[in-house]
Image: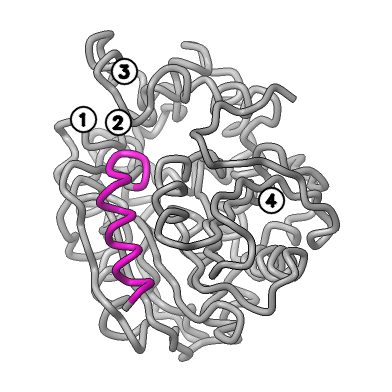
């Protein structure tokens, strides 16, 4: 494949036999140093850590960032809509991380760090195997703890959102539908323009991102979020973000995702499609994850934990109460929550220096 345009000090390789995968990883720093495992989210890649990896390596760490199952240059997975979902359940992502640590020849890592969907994967790594993952940093997606074995009944929020004026729907339930991958694989504006609009709309570059806590899991509260979370009912995701396409001047001024870097995401998703990433959302919304994870109901993350997000990131508050519950209940040794100015959802790309500073301070404390 075409070599990735990586910053100096980052190298790429394939590690075979990782829980049935041939896993593509990016690395920085010398093997033998304390290892940091960096887990990306959706729709991203190991490449999304390119700005922070050299900074963490310069601080004395061996930094490893894989393309997770369903993404990028990692192979050995299949993601047809009718294929079994079991490989994409949360605990199998934990198995992937454990197998990667073993393939690296390590008994444990210094810390696991996850962003977006990688954040709950990192959280579950730390909760299930604290002996191997003795520190955890969560980014953009708070961890509220394991699901309850006896959840409280809730209103049909989806029917209530569909009855709003204008009618809306939740993006995660849209991502679980059969048409979603085809909508995103072949957007009418082209994949490059779709991803440019999507990344822009969720970043601090879009002035409309002014997140705040929501009062509850109700249609009226959820509808306060932008269209990329609570979508127009009849829209695809490409249609939902298209009105927010940045101007040519805004694109030219973007230093955290210049056209050359965006082209990497475009090329990789052109090749793989999006269904590999969407399978994880189906496990969440369809109950496959909860069926396994309720086994851990009442358990907490016992190892030191940190949270980092962008000050302009709605992800911090998209699940009402999760941000507070993470700090008060889900983490026994919580070391701080940092909402970084000048960053939206892509905090490690938008503000890599501050993100690295916060991580290094936590890792060295």
Q: How far across and down, in percent of the image, does residue 161 sit?
A: 32, 47
- In what element is the residue under mark 3? loop
Query: Between disc 1 and disc 4, whose residue precedes?
Result: 4
- In what element is the residue under mark 1? loop
Label 1 crowd (10 A; few <14 / some 14-19 / many >=20): some
| Mark 2 lies on residue | 201
- In what element is the residue under mark 4? loop
Query: Between disc 3 and disc 2, whose residue precedes?
Result: 2
Query: Between disc 2 and disc 4, whose residue precedes?
Result: 4
Label 3 crowd (10 A; few <14 / some 14-19 / many >=20): some
- The residue shown at (20%, 52%) is 340
**Disc 1 versus disc 4: distance between alpha carbons?**
30 Å
The span picked out in magenta is 348-364
Picture quarter containing residue 29?
bottom right
Q: How far across and down, in percent of the image, does residue 180 sit?
A: 57, 34
Marks 2 and 4 in Cβ contact (< 8 Å)? no
Marks 2 and 1 in Cβ contact (< 8 Å)? yes
Query: Between disc 2 and disc 1, whose residue precedes?
Result: 2
**Disc 3 versus disc 2: distance between alpha carbons?**
8 Å
| Mark 1 lies on residue | 206
| Mark 3 lies on residue | 245
């Amino acid at each position: 494949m075409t070599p990735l345009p990586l910053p100096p000090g980052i190298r790429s390789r394939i590690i075979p036999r990782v829980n049935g995968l041939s896993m593509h990883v990016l690395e920085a720093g010398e093997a033998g140093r304390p290892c940091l495992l960096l887990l990306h989210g959706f729709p991203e890649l190991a490449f999304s850590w390119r700005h922070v990896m050299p900074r963490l390596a310069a601080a004395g760490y061996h930094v490893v960032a894989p393309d997770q199952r369903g993404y990028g240059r990692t192979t050995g997975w299949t993601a047809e809509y009718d294929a079994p979902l079991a490989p994409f359940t949360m605990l199998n992502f934990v198995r992937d991380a454990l197998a990667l640590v073993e393939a690296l020849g390590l008994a444990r890592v210094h810390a696991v760090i996850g962003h977006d969907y990688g954040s709950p994967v990192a959280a579950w790594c730390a909760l299930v195997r604290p002996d191997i993952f003795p520190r955890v940093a969560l980014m953009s997606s708070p961890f509220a703890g394991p699901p309850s074995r006896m959840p409280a009944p809730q209103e049909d929020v989806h029917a209530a959102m569909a009855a709003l004026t204008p009618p809306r729907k939740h993006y995660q339930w849209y991502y679980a539908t059969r048409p979603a991958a085809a909508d995103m694989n072949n957007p009418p504006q082209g994949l490059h323009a779709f991803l440019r609009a999507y990344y822009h709309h969720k970043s601090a570059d879009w002035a409309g991102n002014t997140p705040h806590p929501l009062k509850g899991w109700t249609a009226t509260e959820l509808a306060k979020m932008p269209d990329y979370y609570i979508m127009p009912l009849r829209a695809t995701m490409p249609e939902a973000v298209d009105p927010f396409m940045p101007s040519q001047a805004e694109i030219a001024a973007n230093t955290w995702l210049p056209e050359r870097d965006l082209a990497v995401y475009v090329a990789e998703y052109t090749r793989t499609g999006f269904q590999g990433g969407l399978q994880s959302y189906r496990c969440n919304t369809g109950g496959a994850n909860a069926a396994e994870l309720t086994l851990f109901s009442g358990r907490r993350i016992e190892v030191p934990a940190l949270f980092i997000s962008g000050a302009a990131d709605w992800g911090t508050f998209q699940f009402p109460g999760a941000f507070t519950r993470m700090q008060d209940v889900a983490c026994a040794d919580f070391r701080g929550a940092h909402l970084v100015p000048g960053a939206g959802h892509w905090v490690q790309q938008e503000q890599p220096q501050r993100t690295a500073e916060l991580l290094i301070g936590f890792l060295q404390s």
